[in-house]
């Protein structure tokens, strides 16, 4: 048993740190660290900087433009990005649709889409969830009916993250309503500019426009945009979901946020001393820090077994990772107390000159807390993850 | 990084597992617990024969120089089988001797299985604070005597010699005291989990100083951190056994026409137990790797984090396992209830979760904000 990084790993980490120090624009870093809202331009700008270095898709095979990193190197990369405070590389193209195209797409599709995904030429969004489906994904109702060289798509998707910016959406659609619900599903790529598509914002409880409803009204999609075989989409969807990485635990980001929480609690006072010295508050922070230490080792253990392929262990990481993220935001709000009350959307967009009264650090925290209630719901709710653990690991 | 066990480590584990499954069955253990001695000379002889007493002792004293990761493997198996023999007390005592230096002959006898040790560290009212010591040592280095009463001395009634913490001229110091010497009175009793412990009274008992003057507290802390890491490992073994027993029960016990494991309310409890166990296992591994660290701050931080997290998991897994076993879970005839009792006492030994959370907070690293 050896829990230290090798000399090669450490050298790799140094090269990543040097890249981030030189290439991460300070204004992006500042926005991320201060929990301000990121614009479309912020995401694209960072993606293109990373793409120019050849590191935008750490998990891709080299033949498609991946850097050829092993699991430990990918972990170090994610950890260092989180530590530095980079904007995320959005997963919808790089980590979700791309592996499906690589595994099941035809040569033409691979040649066209993959380089564009790598370079962020298209903004992708996800068309899985539907109002009546949720965690029961296979209950989807959006239909695609063949009409010559086209499918005619009708229906509605929801919870489409950042779909308001999207050029492309990957969708699960029902192509055969007469068979078992998992068997009549196909995987379609749809251009968001196609006539008949309407995007309607869903404003979240922190008043952020982060997700959308997407309506399809007789939308004509070329058959060339079908991935793999008709009615085999459920297989591809499961492949996509099984392609989860250990990054789902977000240990790196939580470590950065823990440091933020402590700095915050050192500045806040209680009874004439820093809040972090208050035994009740310190105990909560300590419990959280220990849980995070344990999760980091659990992630590393999972990585060490990665030659066995991604497994249901990812469900453990999802549950624990999101619980920790939520507890971090909860304690941030608790730390600033009534300072969490002022709500200033203009400040969150980066307008600091006329910020509402109070501590600048405190301004985004309540919104952050409310926004992060989503984490135990999305990506398969934590209850669904526990079902996966009981069925796939425990055999109940 | 590498989380796997070396071949020799796996061999130790396999040998212990085979022995426990064959000779240290639940029924055999029950007979040992209810015997007058409370421990088994045969079981001890087997542990010695398997090399367990030699494992953590340096090669110069006839040992195998095993590190804490080697001990992790052993302690997990002893936990799994709920072994009540005085192994941990002896190994912890040996750790004191190694850290203090100068007791090579005694260490060699420990390695050979000829001597059992016990650590007399806690007193009435000291709770988890090992620095709360009222026992005193008086005299000259050549003629030292220890006086005081030590409580819940694990396997104190089975030991040939004690490591005793006492105050000497206001400083914490450590002493070696023979069990059958003048001024030592031992009251041996059973603990709730079937082990043995004793209240040991020292009345100016002849004592040999351990370690250089001024080193007492550092040695005491380092040795008990090692002990805490071992208890974390033992807890993982107990939890593994309890988890497996509970899972099996959920698959077989029928109610409302189905195995009770088909009910989601119970499934989610099992999933929560699994998550606790995996997090605790990670911390037990981390503690085993870091407890030998040259940096005492790092050692304290990680061991306290591990003891706290494993303790919390032990409580959760233990309580849930009993609940899931229903009425059977609260009977003496079921192994699960004994695993639960052992988990509970492990949580209370060498510092409970709250104690270690407090200690974790007290380390300088806690205030770091990058």
Image (tube, coloured by chain):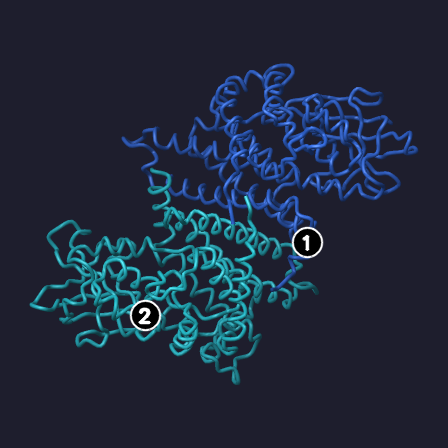
Chain colours: A cyan, B blue
Q: Is residue A323 left or right of residue B118?
A: left
- Residue in the foreground of this view, choosing between A63 and A80: A63
In this picture, is B77 found above or below A279? above
- Residue in the foreground of this view, choosing between B282 and A67: A67
In this picture, is B360 found above or below B142? below
Q: What label sits on residue B363 in the rendered view?
A: 1
Residue at disc 1, secondary structure? loop
- Residue in the foreground of this view, choosing between A64 and A374: A64
Is label 2 in contact with label 1 (beta carbons under 8 Å)?
A: no
* Badge 1 density bin: few <14, some 14–19, many ≥20, Cα 10 Å: some
Farthest-out residue, right: B140
* Badge 2 density bin: few <14, some 14–19, many ≥20, Cα 10 Å: many
Chain to which mark 2 belongs:
A
Query: Dot 2 corresponds to which residue?
Result: A117
Task: Determine the image quadrant of residue B207.
Answer: top right
Farthest-out residue, bottom: A353
**Which residue lies at the image location 52% right of the left edge and 18% below the top edge?**
B23
Q: Is residue A7 left or right of residue A386?
A: right
In percent of width and height, residue B299 lies at 66, 48
Q: Is residue A222 left or right of residue B7?
A: left
In percent of width and height, residue B325 lies at 42, 31
Q: Quadrant of the C terminus of chain B?
A: bottom right
Q: Is residue B364 left or right of residue B288?
A: right
In percent of width and height, residue A305 lies at 43, 47
**Which residue lies at the image location 34% right of the left edge and 34% below the top edge?**
B260
């Amino acid at each position: 048993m050896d829990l230290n990084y090798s000399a090669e790993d450490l050298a790799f980490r140094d090269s990543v740190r040097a890249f981030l120090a030189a290439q991460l624009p300070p204004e992006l870093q500042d926005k991320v660290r201060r929990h301000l809202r990121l614009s479309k331009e912020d995401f694209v700008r960072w993606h293109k900087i990373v793409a120019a270095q050849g590191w935008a898709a750490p998990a891709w095979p080299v033949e498609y433009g991946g850097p050829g990193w092993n699991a430990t190197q990918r972990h170090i990369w994610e950890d260092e990005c989180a530590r530095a405070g980079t904007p995320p590389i959005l997963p919808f193209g790089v980590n979700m649709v791309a592996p499906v195209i690589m595994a099941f797409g035809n040569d033409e599709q691979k040649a066209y889409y993959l380089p564009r995904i790598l370079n962020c030429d298209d903004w992708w969004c996800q068309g899985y969830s539907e109002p009546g489906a949720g965690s029961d994904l296979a209950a989807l109702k959006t239909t695609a009916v063949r009409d010559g060289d086209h499918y005619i798509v009708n229906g509605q998707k929801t919870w489409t993250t950042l779909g308001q910016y999207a050029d492309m959406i990957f969708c699960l659609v029902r192509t055969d309503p007469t068979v078992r619900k998992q068997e009549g599903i196909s995987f379609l790529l749809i251009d968001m500019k196609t006539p008949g598509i309407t995007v309607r914002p869903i404003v979240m409880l922190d008043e952020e426009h982060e997700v959308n409803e997407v309506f399809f009204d007789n939308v004509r999609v070329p058959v060339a945009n079908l991935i793999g075989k008709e009615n085999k989409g459920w297989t591809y969807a499961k492949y996509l979901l099984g392609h989860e990485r250990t990054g789902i635990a977000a240990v790196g980001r939580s470590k950065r946020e823990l440091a933020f929480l402590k700095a915050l609690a050192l500045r806040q006072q209680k009874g004439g001393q820093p809040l972090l010295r208050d035994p009740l508050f310190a105990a909560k922070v300590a419990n959280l820090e220990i849980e995070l230490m344990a999760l980091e080792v659990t992630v590393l253990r999972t990585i060490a077994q990665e030659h066995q392929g991604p497994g249901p262990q990812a469900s453990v990481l999802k549950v624990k990772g999101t619980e920790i993220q939520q507890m971090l935001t909860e304690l941030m709000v608790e730390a600033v107390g009534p300072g969490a009350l002022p709500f200033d959307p203009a400040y969150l967009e980066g307008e600091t000159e006329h910020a509402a009264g109070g501590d600048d650090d405190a301004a985004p925290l309540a919104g952050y807390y409310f926004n992060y209630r989503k984490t135990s719901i999305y990506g398969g709710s934590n209850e669904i993850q526990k079902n996966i653990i009981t069925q796939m690991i425990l055999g109940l | 990084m590498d989380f796997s066990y070396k071949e020799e480590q796996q061999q130790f584990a396999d040998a212990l597992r085979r022995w426990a499954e064959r000779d240290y069955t639940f029924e055999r253990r029950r007979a040992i617990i209810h015997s007058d001695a409370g421990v088994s000379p045969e079981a001890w002889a087997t542990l010695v024969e398997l090399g367990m007493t030699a494992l953590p002792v340096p090669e110069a004293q006839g040992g195998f120089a095993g590190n804490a990761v080697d001990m992790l493997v052993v302690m997990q198996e002893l936990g799994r089988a709920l072994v009540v023999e005085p192994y941990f007390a002896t190994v912890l005592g040996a750790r004191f001797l190694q850290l203090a230096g100068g007791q090579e002959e005694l260490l060699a006898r420990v390695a050979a299985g000829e001597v059992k040790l016990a650590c007399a560290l806690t007193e009435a009212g000291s709770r988890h604070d090992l620095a709360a010591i009222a026992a005193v040592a008086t005299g000259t280095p050549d003629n030292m005597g220890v006086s005081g009463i030590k409580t819940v001395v694990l396997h104190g009634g089975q030991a040939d010699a004690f490591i005793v913490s006492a105050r000497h001229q206001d400083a914490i110091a450590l002493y070696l005291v023979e069990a059958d010497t003048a001024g030592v009175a031992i009251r041996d009793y059973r603990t709730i989990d079937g082990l043995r412990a004793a209240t040991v009274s020292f009345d100016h008992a002849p004592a040999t100083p351990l370690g250089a003057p001024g080193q007492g507290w550092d040695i005491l802390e380092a040795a008990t951190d090692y002990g805490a890491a071992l208890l974390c490992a033992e807890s993982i073994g107990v939890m593994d056994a309890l988890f497996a027993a509970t899972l099996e029960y959920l698959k077989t016990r029928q109610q409302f026409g189905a195995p009770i494991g088909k009910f989601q309310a119970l499934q989610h409890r099992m999933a929560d137990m699994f998550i606790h166990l995996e997090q605790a296992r990670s911390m037990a591994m981390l503690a085993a790797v870091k407890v030998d660290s040259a940096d005492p701050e790092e050692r304290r931080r990680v061991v306290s984090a591990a003891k706290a997290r494993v303790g919390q998991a032990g409580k959760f897994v233990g309580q849930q396992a009993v609940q899931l076993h229903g009425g059977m879970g609260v009977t003496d005839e079921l192994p699960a209830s004994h695993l639960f009792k052992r988990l509970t006492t492990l949580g209370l030994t060498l510092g409970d979760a709250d104690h270690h959370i407090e200690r974790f907070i007290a380390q300088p690293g806690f205030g770091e904000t990058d």
